[in-house]
Amino acid sequence: MALINIASHEIHCKIVYYGIGYCGKTTNLQYVFKSINPSVRGEMLSIATETERTLFFDFLPLDLGTVYGFRTRFHLYTVPGQILYERTRLAVLNGADGIVFVVDSQAEKFEENVQSITELEMNLRRLGKDLTNFPIIMQWNKRDMPSALPVAVLERYLNRRRVPSFEAVASSGTGVYATLRSISKRVMAQL
Amino acid sequence: MEQLTNLIISDHELALISNVLHKLMNDTSASSVMLLDKSGQVVTTQGSSTRRNATSLGALLAGAFSSSRHVAELLGEKDFRTIFQQGVHENIYTTMIEDQWLLVIVFDKLTHIGLVKVLSKKACDELSRTLERVRADTTRQKSSVLNIQFRSSVEDTIDLLFRD
């Protein structure tokens, strides 16, 4: 739920990157962190295990500055992708204004992706979100991998709601900003 | 069920909230008192100890609180309404207001937890009434803030800042 503070002239929105383990959620945030104008970003927080798997979430605050009199901020979060962290994902989703569902395009990950998007839809319903209007976009990540499935296949089985989708190679930054622009605009449009 | 897509806090309501937090901070001798939205966004903060890291603290405290509610569910408990984090010097007491906001009190060992519990309960009651007004006003105020000019400017800013 976005927070609009008229007194302090601030608007805050929460965007969550969701998807299976190693699909590239943290990589998206890391790319934004290292490449965006430093005046726009705050400190990036990562609650990770010793092997750098996300344990709770990553957090990156972005400050767009003052837009038409309102200081506008997006808070980007990732969820932990591993199956055992289902409850933690639900905790991070709480209060989200928009979701980027990051898909690992590799054929061997297909089934896991299907399970993950089913879980996401279930979790959003548990949080009382109306899926027909809630801002969600898809990112087809790891397009550079040899076993990447054709986009048409991913669209057919993983994007049944026909939401906007973007091809990406997050490790090199391809598609990262196109994804971020799209979800940011959809979140603002939904306010 | 979550029905609103946003919460709009006016000058008047923020002043009411700030007064409640300020009084609570003084009465408990706390070093800081914060009001967070359950999504981790900071509504407002009083006191110096949390000001510098308010954004990160908001995300972490709301995450910890949300996580503890799921622990409660798994234990068959209806809810954990509060969390107490005890350090050597600093302690944090967090309590939920109407499933929407989190009241966070940061205090040292000179303040007794019992006092914090009692006075935060009183503050929560006052903040609940303010939240009720915020919820009622949100729809009415939305169009005055999110007008066409704002929407157009924010799209331009997104295009300008979020690019390769």
Image (spheres, helix red, strand yellow):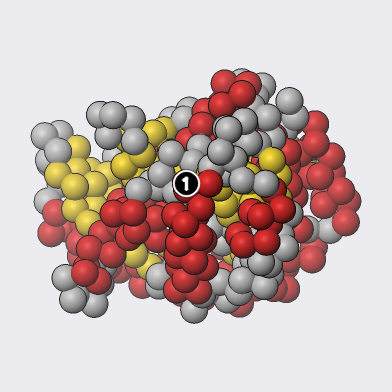
Give the percent coordinates (x, y) of residue A23. Answer: 49, 41
Q: What residue is pinned by disc 1? A: A108
Q: Is residue A104 above or below residue B97?
A: above
Q: Give the side of residue B149 with respect to residue A124, left or right.
A: right
The amino acid sitting under disc 1 is: Glu
Looking at the image, which residue is at 19% across and 53% down? Answer: B84
Looking at the image, which residue is at 88% across and 56% down? Answer: B148
Looking at the image, which residue is at 21% across and 69% down? Answer: B74
Please state which of residues B61 and B90 is positioned toward the viewer in this rendering: B61
Q: Is residue A76 above or below residue B77?
A: above
Please state which of residues A16 and B54 is positioned toward the viewer in this rendering: A16
Give the percent coordinates (x, y) of residue B70. Answer: 28, 64
Give residue A172's quadrant in the image.
top right
Total residue callouts: 1
The answer to whether residue B78 of the structure is visible from this angle is yes
The answer to whether residue A91 of the structure is visible from this angle is no
Q: Is residue B103 above or below residue B127?
A: above
Looking at the image, which residue is at 40% across and 70% down? Answer: B99
Please state which of residues B34 and A88 is positioned toward the viewer in this rendering: A88
